[in-house]
C-alpha cells in the first residue's frame, strides 16, 4: 500500500471534487494515507489570483475530515505552490501561517505563460520549449525556498506538440542535473507523479531515467502522488509504482508529516 500525496479538490479552480469523496476513494483503494495539496498559484499567468484559495476555510474543512476519518485513514493537509522567481518572500510567509504537513513546489508558469496552452509552443520546437521550462525551473528553486519536493519535474512534456518525441533525460541532462543537484544539496526531494501515465505519456513524471539519475546523485526523498482532480483518479496506476521505484534504485518512498520526511518501505 502507498500514500497518495498529491490531490486536488473544489478548493482548486480546476477541480470540483468533494474532499470527502477523495478520502472515500482512497479508503476503497486501501491506501495508507492521503495528503490534500490544493493549488496556491499566485500571479498565475494572466488570470490574477484565480488560482488561490481561502486558507482558513481550507484548514477548517480538512481538520473536520481529519477528525471524522481518524480511525480509518490519516488525512494530511498540504498545498501545491506555483513557483515563480519573484514569489520567494510571498511563499515564505504563506507556508508559515498554517501548520501544513507538506508543500509541493511546482512550475505551472514560464515567462508568464502556462505550458498547458498550445500558444506556448508556437514558433519553436518542443525541445526549445522544454529547455526554457527546465531553465526556469532551476531559477525558481533557487529563488523560492519554502517547499519540500519539486512537483512533476517534466510536466511540460505532457503538452508539447509532439509530447515525448523531443524529450529524453540525455537531451537535457545538463540542466536536469543542475536541478537535481540543487534539490539534493538543499534537502529537498522530488515526486513520482503518475499523472503522466494518465495523460498518455509512456512514463510517469519524471521519466525513469531522471528518477534513476536522482538516485545516482544521492537523492533519497521521493513522494508518490496521482495529481488526482476526481475521486476515480486517486492512486491512478499506483500498482506500477513499486516496480518503477525499485528499478531506479529505491527501496522506499516518502511521506511528509508536519513538514518532516517519513520513509516507508516499498
Image (tube, helix red, strand yellow):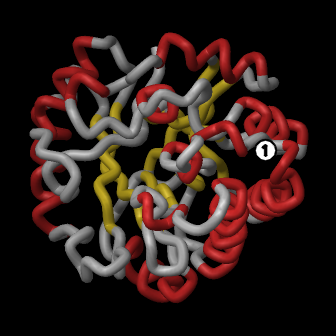
Examine the rendered structure and indicate whether residue 92 appears above or below residue 14: below
Dividing the picture into quadrants, the one containing residue 38 is bottom left
Quarter placement of the C terminus: top right
> Which percent across, then down, holds residue 40?
32, 67
Give me the residue at 84% from left, 48% from top. Answer: 171
Instruction: Locate residue 49 relative to residue 260 in the image: left or right.
Output: left
Question: Foreground: 243 or 256?
Answer: 243
Give me the residue at 17% from left, 59% from top. Answer: 58
Dividing the picture into quadrants, the one containing residue 121 is bottom right
> Which percent across, then down, holds residue 74?
31, 32
Check disc 1 and report the residue beneath it: 219
Give me the residue at 24% from left, 17% from top. Answer: 27
Instruction: Locate residue 96 relative to residue 265 in the image: left or right.
Output: left
Q: Residue furthest front?
A: 123
Examine the rendered structure and indicate whether residue 154 appears above or below residue 228: below
Q: Is residue 41 visible?
A: yes
Question: Foreground: 15 or 35?
Answer: 15
Amino acid at each position: 500500500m502507498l500514500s497518495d500525496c498529491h490531490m486536488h479538490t473544489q478548493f482548486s479552480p480546476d477541480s470540483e471534487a468533494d474532499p470527502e469523496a477523495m478520502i472515500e476513494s482512497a479508503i476503497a483503494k486501501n491506501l495508507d494515507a492521503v495528503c490534500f495539496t490544493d493549488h496556491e498559484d499566485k500571479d498565475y499567468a494572466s488570470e490574477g489570483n484565480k488560482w488561490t484559495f481561502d486558507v482558513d476555510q481550507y484548514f477548517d474543512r480538512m481538520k473536520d475530515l481529519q477528525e471524522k476519518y481518524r480511525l480509518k485513514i490519516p488525512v494530511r493537509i498540504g498545498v501545491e505552490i506555483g513557483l515563480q522567481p519573484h514569489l520567494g518572500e510571498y511563499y515564505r510567509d504563506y507556508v508559515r501561517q498554517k501548520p501544513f504537513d507538506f508543500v509541493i513546489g511546482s512550475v505551472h508558469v514560464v515567462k508568464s505563460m502556462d505550458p498547458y496552452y498550445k500558444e506556448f509552443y508556437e514558433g519553436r520546437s518542443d525541445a526549445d520549449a522544454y529547455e526554457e521550462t527546465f531553465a526556469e525551473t532551476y531559477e525558481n528553486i533557487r529563488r523560492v525556498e519554502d517547499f519540500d519536493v519539486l512537483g512533476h519535474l517534466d510536466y511540460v512534456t505532457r503538452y508539447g506538440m509532439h509530447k515525448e518525441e523531443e524529450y529524453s533525460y540525455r537531451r537535457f541532462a545538463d540542466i536536469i542535473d543542475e536541478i537535481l543537484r540543487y534539490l539534493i544539496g538543499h534537502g529537498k526531494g522530488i515526486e513520482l507523479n503518475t499523472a503522466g501515465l494518465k495523460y498518455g505519456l509512456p512514463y510517469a513524471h519524471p521519466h525513469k531515467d531522471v528518477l534513476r539519475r536522482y538516485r545516482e546523485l544521492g537523492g533519497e526523498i521521493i513522494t508518490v502522488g496521482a495529481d488526482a482532480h476526481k475521486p476515480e483518479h486517486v492512486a491512478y496506476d499506483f500498482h506500477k509504482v513499486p516496480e518503477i521505484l525499485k528499478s531506479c534504485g529505491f527501496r522506499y518512498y516518502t511521506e511528509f508529516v508536519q513538514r518532516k520526511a517519513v520513509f516507508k518501505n516499498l
